[in-house]
Amino acid sequence: EWWQLTLNGGRSWDNSVNFKDGIRSSHFKTRRDSVSLQNDLTLTDSGLLTVGADYQNDEINSSNAYTEDTRDNTGLFAQYQHHGTRFDGRVAVRQDDNEQFGNQTTGSVAVGITLTSALQVTASHGTAFKAPTFNELYFPLFGNPNLDPEESSSTELGLYGKHEAANWSLNLFRTRIEELISFDAVTFTPVNVDDARILGLEAALSTNIK
């Protein structure tokens, strides 16, 4: 009852074959295999510890020759969640070993405080890492082999209300992304944006109609 084990696996393909005047002129095929193992351990009535690992392998087969035609990524992660009467908290950390882009450490921390039976305030901060896909790097006439991975940090403040008639929420967030992978309409290729900042406010209202 206190230990839940989850195993996931998958494979995806992206195959493109091009013909000119009925003759095969080029091909571009990518394959991604992934597997993850996650352990959810209920330590106390209010505490849940999650630990696990995942693995991802990308391969490319193309009529064009590339410096990198295979890449794997191994990740280790851990997270602890506390659900109390007045206080909720979450701390998470992740370590990635990417064959093409090296080691990356990311993490997050979040807290929630129940002010009244109908009102809760939350705050969170986290970092993230995103490697460009093989399609973004190498796809013929589209890819950019000089792309760097994205690195980002996000901070969010939230206010949540629960009432008999409806539930509502307000979330203010700020995200900073270094080397954002974007699209250049002039060159028709993905490019890195040195520094991007996103500031937003999200509002939501929900109700049940019987």
Image (cartoon, grey):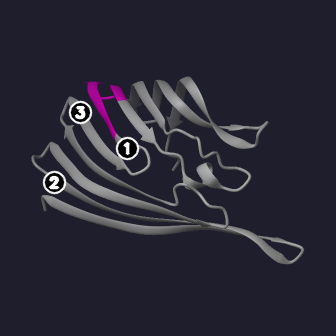
Mark 3 and mark 2 lie on one chain; the one further toward the N terminus is 2
Side of 104 where 142 appears, left or right: right
Query: Do labels 1 and 3 touch, CB within 8 Å?
Result: no
Task: Please state the horizontal and vertical placement of residue 82, each as a whole percent of the image.
Answer: 19, 38
Residue that carries the numbered disc 3 in the rendered image: 89
Residue type indicated by callout 2: Leu
Q: CA distance from mark 3 to mark 2?
A: 16 Å
Which residue does the numbered mark 2 point to in the structure image? 41
Say whether residue 26 is left or right of residue 191. right
**21 w.r.t. 117: above or below:** below
- In the picture, the quarter occupied by the N terminus is bottom left
Element under disc 2: strand
Q: Main secondary structure of the magenta part?
A: strand
Q: Which label's residue is closer to the chain start, 1 or 2?
A: 2
**Quadrant in which residue 112 is drawn:** top left
Q: Nearer the viewer, residue 153 or 14?
A: 14
Q: Choose between 193 and 63: the one closer to the eye.
A: 63
CA gap, disc 1 to disc 3?
31 Å
Q: Position of residue 69 (x, y in %)?
A: 52, 60
Q: Which is nearer the N-term, disc 1 or disc 3? A: 3
**Of the residues shown, which amino acid type is indicated by label 3?**
Gly
Could you tell me residue 31's position as x and y percent? 52, 66
Q: Which residue is mark 1?
A: 102
Q: Residue furthest bottom?
A: 22
Badge 3 crowding class, 10 Å Cα cut-off, few under 14, some 14 to 19, many 20 or more, is some
* Left or right position of 53 against 162: left
Which dot marks residue 94?
Answer: none
Magenta residue span: 104-125
Amino acid type of the residue tagged 1 in the rendering? Gly
